[in-house]
Image (cartoon, rainbow, N blue to C red):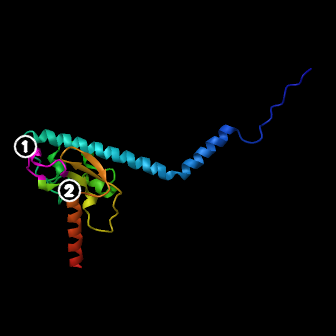
Amino acid sequence: MLKPRSRRKPLGFTLVEILAVTGIVSGLSSHQDFRYAINLANQVKGLHNLRQIHTLLQIRCLTEGYPDAAFYPKDDPKKDPKSILRLLSDAPAELFVSPFAPPALQKKGLTYAWNDTVNGKSPDAVPGTTWLLIDLAACVADPKVEKPSKYLVLYASGKAEAVATPPDDVVRAVKEAEAKAKEKK
């Protein structure tokens, strides 16, 4: 008569277990890859939001020129009548918040600066390479404020892109502000 084999516990690990552990450990070591993926997703979201704002601006500009908005509202962007957020009130509020902005600025509800040199102008009179909206961080002259690696920009042509350096006129204005701040000290 044959005896049934005893069920022994296997000694060691199976190939699947080894591969699973290796995958987890390598995933932990490549945490930077996850940060890259998150940044890329935020960039895509921000650019999409800017394109939607451009569509709303085009609709508005059919009857009027660009809105008479402030560069950035002096008061609460949600209440200031010169805020681009208020002037395009039919747009969802989340369109005006850059995913790269610091949380304190995101709470204000507006994280972009408006190019007030285009106020009241017809879109046909503005060169397509003129920026309309840019991440507010690009306009901050304080060197203590941490800057993102890229800034989201919306141009009059409808192009939205993430740039490493802001447009020349923004860079020039920031340098002038920094020089004035040094003179005051």
- State left or right for residue 45 relative to residue 122: right
The kind of secondary structure the magenta stretch mainly shows is loop
Magenta segment: 118-131
Q: Is residue 33 magenta?
A: no
Write the residue at 23% across / 48% down: 154
Locate the C terminus by quadrant: bottom left
Residue density around tag 1, few if under 14, some if 14–19, many if 20 or more, within 10 Å: some
Q: Which numbered dot is residue 146? A: none
Image coordinates of residue 78 in percent, x first then y, are 20, 51
Image coordinates of residue 58 in percent, x first then y, are 15, 40
Q: Which quarter of the figure has residue 135?
A: bottom left
From this viewpoint, is residue 50 visible? yes
Kindly identify the amino acid type of the residue bearing the numbered disc 2.
Answer: Asp
Q: Which quarter of the figure has residue 11?
A: top right
Write the residue at 66% across / 40% down: 17
Mark positioned earlier in the residue sequence (2 or 1): 1
Check disc 1 and report the residue beneath it. Answer: 64
Write the residue at 59% across / 49% down: 25
Kindly identify the amino acid type of the residue bearing the numbered disc 1.
Answer: Glu
From this viewpoint, is residue 92 visible? no
Check disc 2 and report the residue beneath it. Answer: 76
